[in-house]
Every structure is written in structure tokens, then in C-alpha cells.
Image: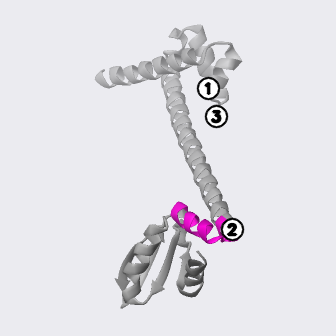
Amino acid sequence: MAWLRGRFLVDGSLSLARGRTHLELVVPPHEGALLGERLASMGLPASWRLRRGRGVVTWKGRETVITFLRRLGATAAVLELESRGVMQSLHGQLNRVINAESANLHRSVAASSRQLAAIEKLKAGGQWDELPEMDQRIAGLRCQAPEQSLREIAERLGVSRARVQRCFQRLEARAAQGSVTAGMG
């Protein structure tokens, strides 16, 4: 391991570009294959190739590089890589949550807009008074607070979210039906 540590200090490089971890040793061309075999016998398998007349022994991937560095005794480097991995993982999770919330918000805004348009059609077409009282109350709350979720409207009225959702489905279907009827007349 001391020999390998020395080779890495002399001929090695660690790259952390764009979140991809890559460690390599650049050696004379005849040493690439031998070093690759020796590393495999030590439980540190690496790929190797010739590049511009030099032998290049390579490890790719954070876990593989961490294993190599840990075996060399490079504790500070291992801790740094693990810290970066945690930060990248947290960043990825945060992005997924933000994207999901954004998509949910877009769907809620689109649904609210459709529901408000349906309510306006029903009022303009004279069908509002034909609606059951609870449907009128649910629709009235949507008009008062277009940003509220179906759950929030349901809680305000003391009914289930499913009931509110079915109400809006009926209102939208009725408004669409009124449009078709008006277009046929």
C-alpha cells in the first residue's frame, strides 16, 4: 500500500468534474497492464488503456474511488468525497421535491381555471339556479378562493374531498354539455 500511495502521489490525479468522480494514474506504457494486474490482485480492480503513448490506469465512480482512497489511508479525501456525495444526494432530492410541487401547483391552477370557467358558463347560461344547493356552495367557495385545494374547500364545508371533486366534475360536464347544446341550436 505504501508503494501504491507513492505512485498515486507521483502519477495520480483525482477529478470531480460535474459530479462525476474519476481517479487515474499515468504511467509508462509498459507498466499499465502490469499495474492493472497488481491492483486486481490487491482487490482494487481498475481499467487501463494506452493514451497518447502513456499507460493510464483508471477508477470511475464515487464508491470505487472512495474504496481506493480508503485503502491508501487518505481519510481526509474520503471524508471530502463522502461529504460531496451527501450534498449531491440532498440537492437531487430537493430538486425532485421542488419539481413535484411545481407540477402539482400547475395541475391545481389548471383545474381551478377550468372549474371557474365552468361556473361562469353555468351562470351565463341560466343553469346556476338548477344546481343542487351543495354544488352551489362548493362552486361559490371556488369563486371566493380560487387558490384553495379541493381538500381545503371540503374542510370548510365539512364534506369529503371526493364529494368536492365529484361536484366539480359534474359542473364541468354540465357546462360542456351546455356548450354543445348551445352550439347545436
Q: Is residue 73 in the magenta section?
A: yes
- Vertical relation: 153 (above or below) 67: above
Numbered circle sitting on residue 142: 1
The residues bearing labels 2 and 3 have C-alpha atoms spaced at a distance of: 52 Å
Determine the secondary structure under disc 3: loop
Name the quarter where the C terminus is drawn.
Answer: top left
* Residue depth check, mark 2 versus mark 3: number of the one nearer the observer: 2
Q: Mark 3 points at which residue?
A: 147
Compared with residue 155, is residue 57 higher up or lower down, i.e. above or below? below
Q: Pick whichever of labels 2 and 3 is earlier in the sequence.
A: 2
* Residue type, numbered disc 2: Thr
Q: Can residue 141 be seen in this view?
A: no
Q: Which of marks 2 and 1 is in front?
A: 2
Residue 174 spot, x, y in % from top left:
43, 18
Q: At numbered mark 1, what does the secondary structure look like: helix, strand or loop?
A: helix
C-alpha distance separating marks 3 and 1: 8 Å
Read off the magenta span.
63-78
> Which residue corresponds to mark 2?
75
Location of residue 80 (image quadrant): bottom right
